[in-house]
Image (cartoon, rainbow, N blue to C red):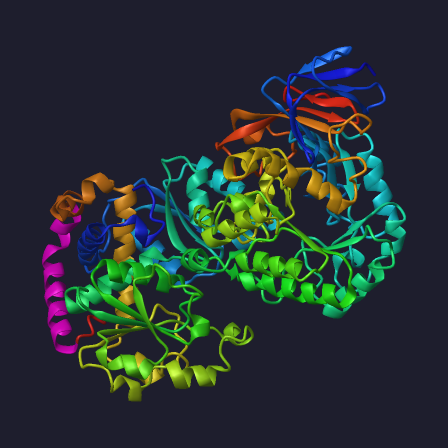
Amino acid sequence: MNHLLSITDLTRADIEQLHKLTDSFAEVSRRSIPKVPALRGKNVVWLFYEDSTRTRLSFEQAAKRLSADTMTFSVGSSSVKKGESLRDTVLTIEAMGVDAIVVRHASAGVPWQIAGWLDDRVSVVNAGDGWHEHPTQALLDSYTIREERGSLEGMHIGIVGDVKHSRVARSDVLAFTALGAEVTLVAPPTLLPPSLVGWPVSVSHDLDAVLPSLDVVYLLRMQNERMTEHLVPSLREYTARYGITLRRVDALRDDALVMHPGPMNRGVEISAEVADLPRSVIVDQVRNGVATRMAVLYLLLGQGVEKVLGAEVSELEVVLDPDRARSGPDNQAQGDAKAGQRSSSGAGVRA
Amino acid sequence: MPTIVLKGGRVIDSTGEREADVVIDADGRIAAVGAGLGADRSLDATGCIVSPGFVDLHSHLRQPGHEEAETIETGARAAALGGYTCILAMPNTIPAVDHAGIVREVLELGRAAPCEVHTSGAITVGRAGEQLAPLGEMAELGVRFFTDDGAGVADARLMRRAMEYAGGLGKAVVLAQHCEDPVLSSGGHMHEGEWSSRLGIPGQPAEAEELMVMRDLTLARLTGTRVHFQHLSTARSVEMVRAAKAAGLAVTCEATTHHFTLTHSECASYDPVFKVNPPLRTDEDVAAVKAGLADGTIDCIATDHAPHTQEAKEAAFDQAPPGMLGLQTALGLALTELDLPIAEVLALLSWRPAVILGVDAEHGLPVAAGNPANLTVIDPTATWVVDPAALASRSRNTPYAGRTLTGQVRHTLLHGEPVVIDGEPQR
């Protein structure tokens, strides 16, 4: 594996191995100096053709904690505005000598096109392509569920809202089901993909009927522009039928989690009170995003897939050791504290 | 011009098949058809089929406006190499072919081309779908086909008026429609269904095409004007036309080579070379198009040859323009992919479209003494591999790169002049 373009690039074993790798980098992130020299000398470029704050910052944090050098290709101020083609931009960046391109684009498939134009030496990471996929989001989402509940095997996960336009939903469906979970998409028919042939999911249009059986309720962002496309009559009606409120939370099992990829529309798909409940692991998703992206960048740019996937993660200690020696005891304490808090609240660390 | 004999071939035309040499006179007409004939110059046709030249009802030649993608000259050369002796240019140039001036320009540029170039005219001014174009002025220059191709005429009242008005311009005039309800298809870049859902590419439903087919069949009944449906791509479109023909409506239709050889699953590569409009559809639609070609519901094969530059096609899938090359691969695809007798394939490529376009006094005629020598000689068993760089078009956007096809054009004669000899263009 040279690139991470889609969850379908990964087997269940690959995802589980990445989660273990993520554990190691989560540990790095808890150190007093949360930085390792794993990717020193490697150069990562952010090629973001679409606005993104959290994903870009998360990748940036991940790369910096791995000691990689980073550059940002800012579309607004670049030659794209002068009419440079996507291919020329990519070849220009490649010629500067980069090791990875992390790309976000409003059009589905662009990361595949970029990978096709590049030398095999350069890795491409899909940071979201149109409505299609957002694989690192699915890795961090499944990691978060595993962190809270131990495993996804047999979990019933409801993905609620605008599945049709959601790259998060497409990647999550693939990752959650690969890990043994059962997924139900909950949305009005207008917000579902036109065809679900080949999707390993069930469908419901009735959130209240599904809630009692869910282990995880995963809410998607509802965008204002959907009203002008006649997909729902109004945000008011959407919230009444599909928004998660304290009343609806009452129907959930005690240990059920509430998740959201952000940015949230408080008061639309999720009420402010629900977002702040201990069972809401939305902040944990963001925290785990950094460790997940460290794992992905390390997998692609560090030892390489052959050495990491299928090998014991303990081999990583070669890389992590120097720093570990310096900050070891500190980590241990934080790790214990986290374990304790998780068992009492189910909400993970919010330090 | 010296006399020419096509030696040792098998003649197939609308009247049947026979082994015969064909002699072409110095005036560009067939002089004799029979055994053991000779002439000043001999072109070998051993093991080959001598057919009336092909006629394409759907070529985008891009001139004026997008000469970087194709010119009338390069498009016509690709056509000649594909066995065509007559092609119909589509009006979506810049500016659009919507008045006599542009018609004259296109016809003038076509005069020196190695294939006869006709042009269609737009139905509405600027193909904007708002105001009737001067159909009469264009018809006086010989334009017989009117279409806003690239877009359908969305306004039902305007389409009705266009049909009624065209009815007064002579029996040969045809209104051709690119059927697509633009509101229902809005924002769609591929066929809406299993693959668009999985790939996250916005789709356009088959029903966007079918709604306009349905509407125009209704308007054809209302007005009595001949209507030709361009590039039909869905099973239900084919079925509706089948029923309309059975009911006696004066309608004809075409299908492209890509709509009987490729499906929407190709889009999984995200390569915009597979982006086309109407989009590649399902296996069932492909089967229905093939069945329609076999039973005569679909009257002819058209190419929808649509050149685009490399830079235009290197965009993201949803930003790239739709369209693919077709003129040089049509015969090979038809012979390779259609389970039809060769004579049927030639009918679909030659004499049936010639009749629809009204060029049947010059093209698609039987290979018989006295008729114009617009002929193509094909080797039906030769196999070749499609190499985009070897195509004569200015553009390279063929979806068939690397595909092996059976059936190759050997010689093409335009009014007796060999414009292609042994697969090589002569001008």
Give the vertical position of A351 relative to B340 (above or below): below
Q: Residue at x 45, y 85 (%)?
A: A237
Instruction: Please state, as top left, top right, bottom left or bottom right, where the N terminus of chain A lies in the image.
Output: top left
Q: Magenta span: helix, strand or loop, mainly?
A: helix
Residue B282 shows up from this direction: no
Instruction: Please state, as top left, top right, bottom left or bottom right, where the C terminus of chain A lies in the image.
Output: bottom left
Give the vertical position of A46 relative to A270 (above or below): above
Name the foreground residue: B78 vs A134. Answer: B78
Residue A299, horizontal then vertical, whole percent = 26, 46
Name the foreground residue: B320 vs A295. Answer: B320
Residue A7 shows up from this direction: yes
Residue B352, horizontal then vertical, whole percent = 69, 42
* Residue B414 within the magenta-colored segment of the rendering: no
Q: Quadrant of residue B89?
A: top right
Name the foreground residue: A72 vs B348. Answer: B348
Q: Which residues are magenta?
A: A322-345
Judged left or right of residue B139, residue A3 is left
Give the vertical position of B224 relative to B172 (above or below): below
Residue B110, horizontal then vertical, whole percent = 80, 35
* Residue A336 within the magenta-colored segment of the rendering: yes
Q: Quadrant of residue B219?
A: bottom right
Residue A59, horizontal then vertical, whole percent = 35, 55
Judged left or right of residue A65, residue B251 is right
Name the foreground residue: B368 vs A68. Answer: B368
